[in-house]
Image (tube, helix red, strand yellow):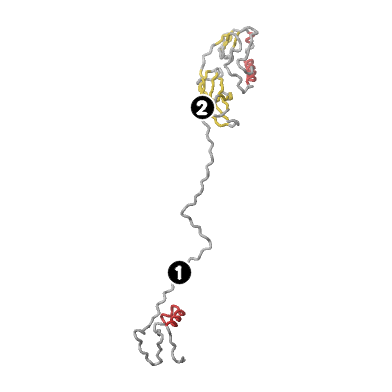
């Protein structure tokens, strides 16, 4: 090819040049014309006839789309925890078994009201096998028999009249307290006979306050020893034959003095040497 002749640009060469020039090519290539295959460039000063319509293949480069920046989030190196729409099933804790509460105990006094100087039977309906009762300053153990607990409580002859409360403590087989409750009763007056005694000065000298204190101390010592097993199965019997000369709880008036010193036993009169037996199987003080 002659070095003086102008270089021919084919469509392919022009496209390659456009790709190399990027977006700057369309503005500079506005006056260029792509030559079809077989078409020659006109020499300097020579006019090339216009091509036929079939040969008119003037092509303008399409406008390159403007570069668009797309922000792409950088991948995170730390995995992101996603919350599942379905909550995972968490097993609920198994409730610990609760102890079945014991039935509440019920109480019954027989008789309902207790006379001063008399004894009452206290029945306790409960499932516990043992317990005790605190009444008028004394403690009485409860006995189990026939599906219930019971005890005998005595009221002193000099006890004040009015409502009274028995404090009941129930225990299981190991001696552990399971319930504390109260049972109510009332101390009522009982009409008692009065013995009017006439004694000599020698006998009366023995009935001093100091002698009474000594007798009470001896009685307290003997009665403090308590046998827990129940030894009797039948009602008490009269321990000796004879006539009851002084009833339990009777008042005394000595030589016309004031009534007092309620009798704490029952006197049976008979001849000297009359046999005396226990009123029931027990320890005789």
Within 10 Å of disc 1 (Cα), the crowding (few <14, some 14-19, many 20+) is few
- Indicate the quadrant containing the C terminus: top left, top right, bottom left or bottom right: top right
The quarter of the picture where residue 142 lies is top right
Q: Secondary structure at mark 2?
A: strand
Query: Who is closer to the viewer here, 236 or 10?
Result: 10
Image coordinates for residue 16, horizontal then vertical, percent: 45, 80
Q: Secondary structure at mark 1?
A: loop
The quarter of the picture where residue 210 lies is top right
Q: Does residue 59 lie above or below 86 as drawn?
A: below
Query: Who is closer to the viewer here, 150 or 38?
Result: 38
Q: Does residue 147 lie above or below 21 as drawn?
A: above
Query: Which residue position is annotated with label 2?
Result: 106
Query: Which residue position is annotated with label 1?
Result: 70
The quarter of the picture where residue 30 lies is bottom left
Query: Who is closer to the viewer here, 125 or 1?
Result: 1
Residue 32 visible from this viewpoint:
no
Image coordinates for residue 203, horizontal then vertical, percent: 63, 9
Image coordinates for residue 42, horizontal then vertical, percent: 40, 90
Does label 1 or label 2 sit earlier along the sequence?
Answer: 1
Q: Gap between marks 1 and 2, in whole Å?
A: 88 Å
Q: Residue furthest left?
A: 53
Image coordinates for residue 158, horizontal then vertical, percent: 55, 18
């Amino acid at each position: 090819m002659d070095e003086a002749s102008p270089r021919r640009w084919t469509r392919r060469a022009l496209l390659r040049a456009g790709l190399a020039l990027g977006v700057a090519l369309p503005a500079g290539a506005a006056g260029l014309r792509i030559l079809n295959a077989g078409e020659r460039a006109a020499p300097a000063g020579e006019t090339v006839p216009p091509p036929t319509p079939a040969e008119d293949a003037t092509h303008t480069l399409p406008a390159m789309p403007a570069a668009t920046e797309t922000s792409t989030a950088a991948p995170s190196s730390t995995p992101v925890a996603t919350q599942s729409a379905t909550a995972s099933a968490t097993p609920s804790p198994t409730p610990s078994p609760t102890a079945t509460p014991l039935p509440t105990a019920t109480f019954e006094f027989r008789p309902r009201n207790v006379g001063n100087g008399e004894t009452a039977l206290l029945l306790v309906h409960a499932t516990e096998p043992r317990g005790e009762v605190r009444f008028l300053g004394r403690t009485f153990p409860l006995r189990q028999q026939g599906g219930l607990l019971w005890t005998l409580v005595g009221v002193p002859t000099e006890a004040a009249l009015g409502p009274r409360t028995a404090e009941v403590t129930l225990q299981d087989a190991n001696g552990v307290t399971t319930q504390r409750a109260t049972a109510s009763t009332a101390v009522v007056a009982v009409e008692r006979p009065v013995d009017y005694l006439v004694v000599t000065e020698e006998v009366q000298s023995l009935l001093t306050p100091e002698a009474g204190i000594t007798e009470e101390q001896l009685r307290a010592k003997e009665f403090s020893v308590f046998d827990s097993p129940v030894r009797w199965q039948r009602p008490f019997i009269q321990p000796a034959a004879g006539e009851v000369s002084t009833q339990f709880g009777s008042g005394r008036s000595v030589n016309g003095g004031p009534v007092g010193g309620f009798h704490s036993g029952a006197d049976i009169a008979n001849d000297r040497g009359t046999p005396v037996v226990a009123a029931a199987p027990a320890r005789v003080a």
